[in-house]
Amino acid sequence: MKQAIVARTDIGMGKGKLAAQVAHASLSAYEDTSTKTKRAWKGEGQKKVVLKGESEQQLFELADKAEREGLPNAIIRDAGHTQLDPGTVTALAVGPGDEGAIDRVTGELSLF
């Protein structure tokens, strides 16, 4: 079991902004996860990886793949209070779910 969070590299987020967006994504996808999967993921230590995404389009394509795999996922749009324009897509979380299924969606991406 694991969760993958894909954060965009093309919009110049600072480290604090990046951390906040990754946290938003992780929690949002978790909230849409079945109770059984939540329990299993928690029992295995809540494994997460943060990966590099190159564009908004890529995040939406990955979200579509996640949907086809039946995985919970969440696209995050920034509120625009600090560094980014309102509505800027910043991150995507995929899972928690079966590690093999997560890897079929995000396995080609590099670690952040």
Image (cartoon, rainbow, N blue to C red):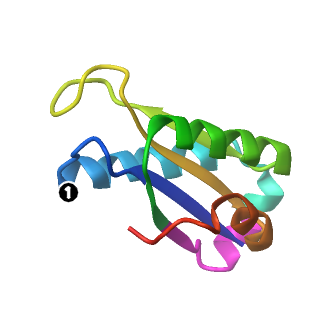
The answer to if 59 sits in the magenta stretch is no
Closer to us: 51 or 46: 51
Query: At numbered mark 1, what does the secondary structure look like: helix, strand or loop?
Result: helix
The stretch drawn in magenta includes residue 48 = yes
- Percent across and percent down for residue 3 are 61, 63
Residue at 47% in and 63% down = 51
* Residue 52 position within the rendered picture, expressed as x and y whole percent measured from the top left: 43, 60
84 or 29: nearer the viewer: 84
Crowd band around label 1 with a 10 angstrom C-alpha radius: few (<14), some (14–19), many (20+): few
Residue 41 relative to residue 20: left or right: right
- Residue at 64% from the left image edge and 68% from the top image edge: 107
The x, y position of residue 77, in whole percent, is: 42, 29
Tell whether 65 sits left or right of 50. right
Q: Is residue 69 above or below residue 46?
A: above
Residue type at mark 1 is Lys
Q: Is residue 31 visible?
A: no
Q: Which residue is mark 1?
A: 15
Comparing 37 with 104, the one in front is 104
Q: Position of residue 11 (x, y in %)?
A: 27, 41
The magenta span reads 39-49
> Quarter holding the N terminus?
bottom right
- Residue 83 seen in render: yes
Q: Residue at x 31, y 45 (%)?
A: 10
